[in-house]
Amino acid sequence: MKNYLLVFVLIFISAVTSSATVVTNITASYHDGQTFIVWDIIAGYGGFYYVYRYDHPINNNNIDSAKYMGKVPHDFSFNYFLNLATNPGTQTRFLVINRNPLDSLNATKGLFVTTCSAQKTVYYAVTSDSINLSGVQVENKYMLPGSNAMTAGIAER
């Protein structure tokens, strides 16, 4: 009986940890040969975000077939070397996407930019990592279509 309880507790902790480390509201826009992937960051998160690309919508069954594009740190939007503009009224610095000051990032958003080489429609997904029970940082590849995986493709033309 104790073994079943231990297994249940471990599964419960794993499920809570997994759902707490899934990004939300992933979107992408294409402009002048580059795709800008933006998502809502995980509050209080301190790891890396991993970006994947695939010819089909990315889900739990095909995430390992998707192409790994790279990773960005949790505090990417705080990197002032990447800021391109300053709000004249408040002197608040922010990232500008596509050189449009109305399309800016704040500390609640993550960003990954990729240069496109193929002329096709693709899908993106963003994962995160977390510390497992052994204290090792592992990537959480759990997919929630519409949350951390795009359900509509982006035409990179």
Image: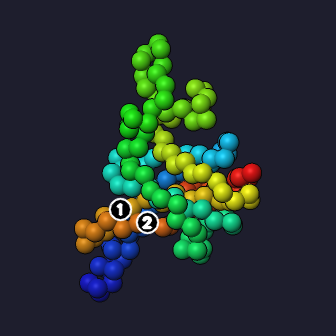
Residue 148 in picture, x, y percent from top left: 55, 56
Residue at the image point whose x is 26% and y is 84% from the top: 2
Q: Position of residue 97 (x, y in %)?
A: 57, 36
Residue lying farthest to the top in this orientation: 89
**Which residue is found at the position 38% from the left and 50% from the top?**
73
From the viewer's side, name the closer residue of 133 and 103. Answer: 103
**Quadrant in the picture for the N terminus:** bottom left
First in sequence, mark 1 or 2: give its number: 1
Residue topped by disc 1? 130
What is the number of the mark on residue 112?
A: none
User: Label 1 sits on what residue type?
Assistant: Ser
Looking at the image, can residue 37 be seen?
A: no
User: Around disc 2, counting alpha carbons within 10 Å, would you say few (fewer than 14), some (14 to 19), or many (20 or more)?
Assistant: many
- Left or right position of 4 against 30: left
Q: What amino acid is labelled 2 in the image?
A: Asn
In the image, residue 111 above or below residue 96: below
- The correct choice, above or below, for 135 with respect to 104 in the image is below
Q: Which mark is residue 140?
A: 2
Residue at 25% in and 68% down: 135
Residue in the picture at 48% in, 29% down: 84
Can residue 93 be seen by looking at this rendering?
Answer: yes
The answer to whether the residue labelled 1 contacts the one labelled 2, judged by CB atoms less than 8 Å apart, is: yes
Q: Secondary structure at mark 2?
A: strand
In which quadrant of the rendered view does residue 82 lie? top left
Q: Is residue 41 left or right of residue 116?
A: left
Density class for disc 1 (Cα within 10 Å; few <14, some 14-19, many ≥20) is some
* Image coordinates for residue 42, horizontal then vertical, percent: 43, 49
Residue 89 drawn above or below residue 47: above
| Whole-percent x, y for residue 99 in the image | 59, 30
- As rendered, which of 80 and 10 lies closer to the eye? 80
Q: How many marks?
A: 2
Helix, strand or loop for disc 1:
strand
